[in-house]
Image (cartoon, rainbow, N blue to C red):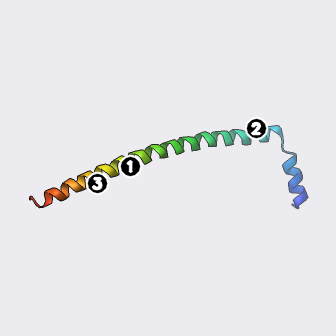
Amino acid sequence: MDAIGIYISHVNRTKSEIEKEMLYAAEKIVELERTVELGKQAEKELEKVRERMMELALEYASLKGDM
C-alpha cells in the first residue's frame, strides 16, 4: 500500500472505529492513573521503611558491643 492509500484509509475511518479507539484510550488513561497513584503510595511506604531500617541499624550498631 502506498502513502496515499494509507492516508486515505486513515482519513476514511468510521465513527465507530474512532469511538472504539477513544474508549480504549480512556480505559488506558484510567489504568495508568491508578498505576501512578499506586506508585506514589509505594514510594511513600518505601521512604518510611528505609527510615525505619536506618533507625534499627543505628540501634543495632550501638548494641553490638554490648553482646
Cα–Cα span, label 3 and label 2: 52 Å
Cα–Cα span, label 1 and label 3: 11 Å
Of pointers 1 and 2, the one earlier in the residue sequence:
2
Note whether 58 is above or below 25 in the view shown: below
Q: Residue at x 19, y 59 (%)?
A: 61
Amino acid under label 1? Answer: Glu
Residue 30 in picture, x, y percent from top left: 60, 39
Mark 3 lies on a secondary structure that is helix
Amino acid under label 2? Answer: Glu
| Residue topped by disc 3 | 54
Residue 40 in picture, x, y percent from top left: 48, 45
Image check: 19 left or right of 59? Answer: right
**Would you say the residues marked 3 and 2 are in contact, meaning their CB atoms lie under 8 Å apart?**
no
Quadrant for residue 34, please give it.
top right
Quadrant including the C terminus: bottom left
Quadrant including the N terminus: bottom right
Q: Nearer the viewer, residue 24 or 30?
A: 30
| Residue topped by disc 1 | 47
The crowd level at tag 2 (other Cα within 10 Å; few <14, some 14-19, many 20+) is few
| Residue topped by disc 2 | 19
Of pointers 3 and 2, the one earlier in the residue sequence:
2
Amino acid under label 3? Answer: Met
Of pointers 1 and 3, the one earlier in the residue sequence:
1
Q: Nearer the viewer, residue 10 or 37?
A: 37
Mark 1 lies on a secondary structure that is helix
